[in-house]
Amino acid sequence: MAEDKNEYWDYESEFFSTFGEESLSETVPASQIKPQTASDRRILDIFFVIDVSGSMRGTRIGQVNYALENIFKELRGKEDMNSVMKVAILEFCNEAVWKTQSPILLNDYVFTPIDVYPAYTCYGKAFDALEMKLHKNGFMDPNLGEYYAPLILFISDGEPTDLKDYPRSLQRLKSNAWFKKSTRYAIAVGEDAKTENVGRILSEFTDERKNVRYADEGAQLCDLIEFIAIKASEVQTSMVSKPVGENYSDKPQSIFETEDDALFSSLFKG
Amino acid sequence: MNDNRYIIFNQSLIGAAHVSKGLICQDASVSCAYNEYYIAVVSDGHGNRRHFRSHVGARIACDVTVEQIKKYIDGGLELVELKQNICDEWKHSVNKDFENNPWTDEELEEQRRILSEDDYTDLLKGDSHTLAYGCTLVAVFTDGNGYTALQIGDGSFAVVDLKGSYSWPMPESKYNDGNKTFSLCASDPMVDFRHVIDMKKTAALFVYSDGIEKAYPNEEKGIISLLFWILSEYRSGKNEKEESLNNTLQRITDSSRNGDDVSIAGIIDNKAEITRPQLSVAQITREYETLDAQINEIDNTISYNQDRLNELRNDRSRDNSESIKQIESIIERKKNEREQLNLKRTFWKEKCTISNPSTKDSISNDEINTSVNAKNKEDNPCESNNMPDTSVPMKESKDCYLEKAVCEYRIDKKNSLKNVGRFGSFKGYLDINNNNLSITKAPVFNGIIQRASEQYLCELLKVSKPVLVLNRERVKSINKALAYKMEWRVIEFDDKEMAVTSAKNVIADIDKWYESTLGSGD
């Protein structure tokens, strides 16, 4: 080895921080090589898209808030040495606003309750805001590490009021590569959302009818949100190596085995 | 062959996750010498339970590959025949293994549970038995005067050249992504059977499974450190090197996210001069950009929490003291993290600016020393921006910003163009828009506008190379690696206003220059 090796490694100590400068010298056993750092863990982004229009006032938003608070506590315990979870909440009514400028690590996130506004339910705005961030220049910055397929949970209690605009937005969203890759669930809340139109739009949004669920505005809503977020995040992070060309699905399996009878039987079979 | 010129090695280790699931190691590896050649092979058996004999498949893959490479070395095969033979012989050997060892009751019981009825029927009929043996393959062989490497599915092949540069020359698979890989068990594995041949001499050649790749992604400093360590360890001739490598692999699988099996095999030139690893400019750039993204993310987190904190402090309707305390502690922690990352970023920023790869695309020790000396010698505001190229006479400090503000490169076709059609069909422009100075539009690095601009800018600034100034706010959208390739110095500035003011002065001069030198364009 060249004589100036030490000088080089001194200078480069930061460069080789993964292993530690000294472990590269011949005298330090390999067993001292440092493992990966936290930032090397694969990222699971969880996006909550939440209707904050006036109709969500009261119990509905209360249950959503209660559920989200619990979820964040629960999910923190689910992180391991291989994965790290980040959350971002998109609130939509007349407009759609991300509560955070970028997804935030669970550990750095203290949940504060979501408020509702006396406004309409514009699905199109939510779809546009989602689409805008599902890019490498948005939330999926490759410089931050590798990503699992993101998890998106959509919650609304009514039909879209932007009937003319939302189809174009949904179409654009559905051509987004990260959206295609994502796993989506949707919850229709309360009787007003139990319509054929909502069922159809949300089925189109999730791509799978069984991923669209119905909840009344009581504790069932809270339980359902918690169940989906926690169960689905487990599924997202448990993907294993699979060969190409065989009959495996590219996407993680749905956590539901069948369609939601409470929703679809009344809509489509009734 | 036996002159100890080359060291060959291979190791496979069961992954931590496989141990905990009670599985066996599904990787296999082999290294050997044959006539004047050295061969290293790694095969990774698929982890899905559907591929319940992938460990056998991987072993067979290693054996048939070595056997066929030997035939190729003897001159009995063309390259395409070598590849086809490996696929055919693997299937043949798998068929033979299946004939000799039909499915056991235990295997069938498990498959009955996990397969659909149709798939299970196929399995019983023996129609899909090769699936059970599915595995990938990556192999390399050399006689010291160049190498040939082969690959199906995931895994990696790394080359260390005599200058200490690390590269991964195998063409990428069209079929692999994070969760799936092509396989020898596919109906036509030749579809993804890639190869690379190079006649250059090398210091070391490594093949390794995706268990290592997932822990240390290709082309990043982690894997370079690991390979350099292995290279040095084996070259040192220490007795315990096998054990050391084993320990290292153990740590890799213990700490990796998948806990996958890990395998590596290699061929190391024992006589080649060991050169310290050299990072390419692209690698340096990536490192810098990663830190930038991390700092940006931390800023967002701090800003989000700061907003929440203000909201909670103003909210008198309930007791928020607990949340306020939590948020304050998060902000404090993130600020500390930011400080640490900033230190790192300064380190890499220096690397970016001192790299100025005028004649090569990586950093040498001399350059580093030059920069350190330059830094120590002068106490000039310019120094904090790291422009230590001693071949460039330093300008007065008042001109420093001018020099840095020469141009900011953006791809933005909407800007008005100043046609410089004199340079052939290419249309470039120099424009100030939205307080940012652009020098050309895409394709900016086609060499034409670059030469023209370079000539003028060098004259104007009395420097040997133009300087590409990047506004940090916009740095994300810029492929700095390209700029480095064109041998432009890259500097980032924080003081946007000052830089832009100076830039406007420069652009006025540039306009004059274009008019006097080039006329009106077309």
Image (cartoon, grey):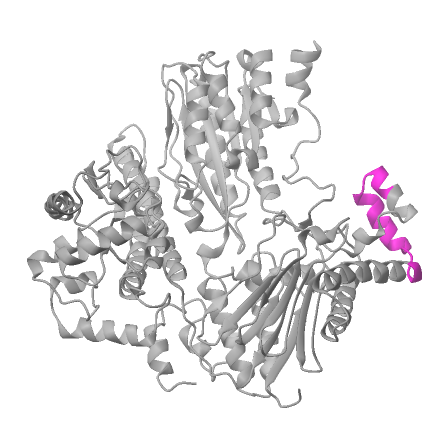
Front residue of this view, candidates A8 and B40 = B40
Q: In this view, does A118 lie to the left or right of A106?
A: left
Instruction: Give how far across and how far down residue A92 sits, in percent.
Output: 41, 23
Image coords of residue B55 (percent x, y): 76, 62
Instruction: Describe residue B145's horizontal placement relative to residue A34 as left or right.
Output: right
Q: Could you tell me residue B165's position as x and y percent?
A: 45, 70
Figure quadrant of the N terminus of chain A: bottom left
The residue positioned 39% from the left and 46% from the top of the image is A108
- Between B195 and B362, the residue placed more toward the observer is B195
Q: Residue furthest toward the bottom?
A: B3
State the residue at coordinates (29%, 73%). Answer: B368
Quadrant (top left, top right, bottom left, bottom right) of the C terminus of chain A:
top right
Q: Does B426 appear above or below B384?
A: above
At 35% from the left edge and 69% from the top edge, which residue is drawn?
Answer: B363
Camera sees residue A59: no
Taking B392 as reference, is A49 left or right?
Answer: right
**B258 in relation to A265, above or below:** below
Q: Residue B321 in magenta?
A: no
Residue range in magenta is B99-120
Relative to residue B242, is residue B453 depicted above or below?
above
Figure disc tally:
0
Viewer-closest of B322 and B252: B252
Which secondary structure is most common in the magenta stretch?
A: helix
Seen at 44% across and 44% down, the residue is A106
